[in-house]
Image (spheres, coloured by chain):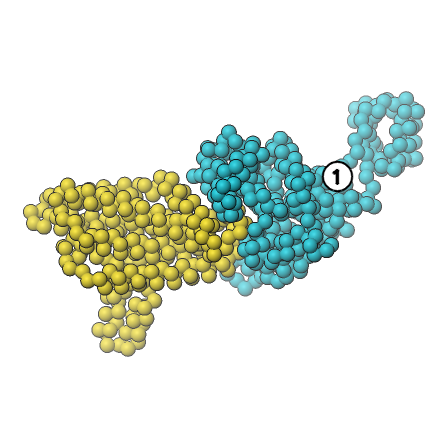
Chain colours: A yellow, B cyan
């Protein structure tokens, strides 16, 4: 598989996304929310730094996911709908290269925007005197992996359905991904073998996105072990790879009518 | 045609589509077979919905054939490698509005593995060819339809391909734009390139194509050189004359089989090509004024219409 073609598609996707002004609106609101953490925290007499960081880290994660879904759901669909994919696939590149190149370009875009939010967060924290520690870096790393996974899901759904449905499915997967542990525990506690089996299966199949959320550890300066970071990292990498394999398999079978 | 002389080969290609989610299948291509020789300009002609674009999409790997096989320069179209030496201009091409013309060509040059050292020169050459040098750095959203078409042609040629597929290349172009595209196709032919062109415009087919296939409802009705298709058909000529005496009119009808229509003081006469000389001689002998002689150029169109109507 030629890396040049994939790099060309990724680079082009990045360039187009960076020039898409609509995405900047979300980024703007994210930075406003991070900044507003300073105002909210100033109203509190206790743990103002923790409130500032809770708001900021939540803003990075939520707006990052919103950006990933917003841009990601259109990523493949728009190329097919506007028929720009015709001239691209008429070159000696495979459909897998196309899908993976689009995914890489969009993930880079989202990471870039998340980095902007991170810089804004660090700036607000430093000005407000809130401490920054290596837990914040771990949080950023895992948010990056989670965003890549959300982009992969958006790419998958965008490869065979409309942006509206892709948004619905991706948001649904992300929301359920926040609850899969509770679902599993609920099933286990129910005492019903069938429900236990179903919830255990759902836990295995659906993404477990809670493991990527280190916001509490970062905001409170709680200790982290290497496995708290490495296991979600490996899980995210594996799950993203699987989702992309399915996306490629679906895209390979498509007819562009 | 020897195997090595074949640029495009289509053998028994069938394509079924399933509209909606039902089990019903709609067959668009019915066992299509034809070959295009290297260096040929091949015209693929047919009415809307005949399956021309679907055939092109099969060749570009955008649509998978239900049965049969197709190859370009001997490589099956299912393989990415088949598009190594291929350029493609889709009908009404559309490109990302957020890129400039130059950026778009650089992007496609990278996709086509044009070496980095040659890329900038090749892009500049193509921008000159298609007359977009001045607008090269403007965003594509500012391009007119004709400019979009020209940048589309440039991206198809950016890697100097051997086989070029054009889907309705004259679509939406003004007369000047159409002439430029015609000149470009003639230039490609003179360079030994193979050009496969989907078109509705039969005058272009007559002018440009070495061979033509007429596709109707997913089946090829005709395949051959335009002059071969025209063999056996009688061309007609329109003559406009004035001051034609009534007895001459009768003689023209009886001896030349001419069809006449009065138009003020002028007489419009349609006559078969073989009777033209005799008709002109009679008009001149009768001291009539011959205003114009216009050969009918719609013979291919007549063949096309006959094929579409299933008469031939």
At mark 1, the secondary structure is loop
Q: Quadrant of residue A194?
A: bottom left
Residue B54 shows in the view: no
Say which residue appears at 19% left-offset and 49% top-offset. Answer: A55
Q: Which residue is mark 1?
A: B298
Q: Tag 1, which chain?
A: B
Residue situated furthest left in the rendering: A45
**Which residue is more in the foreground, B20 or A28?**
A28
Question: Would residue B1 be found to the left or right of residue A27 on screen?
Answer: right
Residue A17 placement (x, y as % from top left) = 38, 44
Q: Quick check: can you spot residue B287?
A: yes
Answer with the quarter of the image where residue B147 lies. Answer: top right
Percent coordinates x, y for residue A154 in the rendering = 38, 54
| Residue B265 placement (x, y as % from top left) | 81, 23
Residue B260 coordinates in the image, percent (x, y): 83, 32
Return the residue nearer the eye: A74 or A226.
Answer: A226
A220 lies above or below B153: below
Residue at x 28% of width, y 47% of height: A114
Residue B193, placed above or below residue B125: below
Left or right, A47 with respect to A102, comes to left
Indicate left or right for A140 with B19 as reference: left
- Residue depicted at 49% across the width and 45% down the height: B110
| A69 lies above or below A211 | above
Q: How many marks?
A: 1
Q: Residue at x 12, y 44 (%)?
A: A129
- Neighbour tally class for label 1: few under 14, some 14-19, many 20 plus, Cα within 10 Å: some
């Amino acid at each position: 598989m030629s890396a040049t073609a994939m790099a060309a598609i990724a680079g082009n996707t990045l360039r187009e996304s960076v020039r898409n002004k609509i995405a900047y609106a979300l980024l703007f609101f994210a930075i406003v929310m991070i900044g507003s953490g300073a105002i909210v925290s100033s109203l509190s007499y206790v743990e103002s730094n923790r409130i500032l960081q809770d708001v900021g880290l939540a803003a990075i994660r939520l707006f990052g996911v919103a950006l990933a879904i917003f841009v990601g759901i259109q990523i493949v669909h728009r190329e097919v709908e506007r028929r720009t994919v015709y001239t691209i696939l008429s070159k000696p590149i495979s459909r897998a290269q196309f899908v993976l190149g689009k995914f890489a370009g969009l993930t880079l875009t989202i990471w870039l925007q998340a980095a902007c939010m991170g810089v804004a967060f660090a700036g607000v924290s430093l000005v407000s005197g809130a401490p920054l520690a290596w837990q914040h870096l771990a949080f950023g790393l895992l948010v990056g992996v989670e965003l890549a996974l959300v982009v992969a899901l958006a790419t998958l759904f965008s490869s065979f359905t409309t942006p509206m449905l892709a948004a619905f499915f991706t948001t649904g997967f992300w929301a359920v991904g926040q609850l899969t542990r509770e679902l599993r525990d609920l099933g286990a506690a129910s005492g019903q073998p069938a429900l236990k089996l179903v919830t255990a299966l759902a836990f295995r199949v659906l993404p477990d996105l809670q493991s990527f959320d280190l916001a509490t550890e970062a905001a409170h300066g709680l200790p982290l072990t290497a496995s708290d970071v490495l296991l979600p990292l490996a899980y995210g990498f594996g799950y993203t790879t699987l989702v992309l394999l399915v996306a490629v398999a679906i895209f390979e079978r498509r007819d562009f009518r | 045609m020897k195997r090595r002389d074949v640029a495009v080969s289509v053998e028994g290609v069938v394509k079924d589509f399933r509209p909606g989610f039902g089990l019903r299948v709609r067959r668009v291509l019915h066992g299509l077979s034809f070959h295009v020789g290297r260096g040929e300009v091949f015209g693929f002609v047919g009415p809307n919905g005949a399956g021309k674009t679907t055939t092109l999409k099969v060749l570009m790997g955008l649509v998978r054939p239900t049965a049969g096989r197709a190859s370009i320069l001997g490589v099956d179209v299912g393989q990415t490698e088949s598009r190594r030496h291929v350029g493609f201009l889709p009908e009404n091409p559309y490109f990302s509005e957020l890129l400039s013309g130059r950026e778009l060509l650089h992007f496609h040059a990278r996709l086509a593995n044009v070496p980095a050292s040659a890329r900038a020169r090749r892009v500049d050459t193509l921008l000159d060819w298609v007359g977009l040098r001045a607008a090269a750095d403007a965003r594509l959203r500012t391009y007119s339809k004709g400019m979009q078409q020209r940048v589309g042609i440039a991206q198809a040629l950016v890697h100097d391909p051997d086989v070029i597929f054009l889907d309705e290349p004259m679509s939406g172009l003004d007369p000047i734009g159409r002439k430029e595209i015609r000149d470009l196709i003639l230039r490609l032919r003179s360079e030994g390139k193979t050009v496969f062109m989907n078109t509705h415009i039969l005058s272009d087919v007559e002018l440009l194509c070495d061979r033509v296939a007429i596709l109707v409802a997913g089946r090829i009705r005709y395949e051959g050189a335009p002059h071969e298709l025209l063999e056996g058909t009688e061309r007609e000529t329109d003559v406009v004359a004035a001051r034609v005496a009534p007895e001459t009119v009768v003689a023209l009808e009886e001896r030349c089989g001419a069809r006449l229509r009065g138009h003020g003081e002028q007489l419009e006469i349609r006559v078969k090509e073989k009777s033209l000389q005799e008709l002109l001689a009679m008009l001149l002998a009768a001291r009539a004024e011959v205003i114009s002689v216009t050969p009918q150029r719609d013979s291919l169109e007549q063949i096309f219409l006959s094929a579409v109507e299933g008469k031939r």
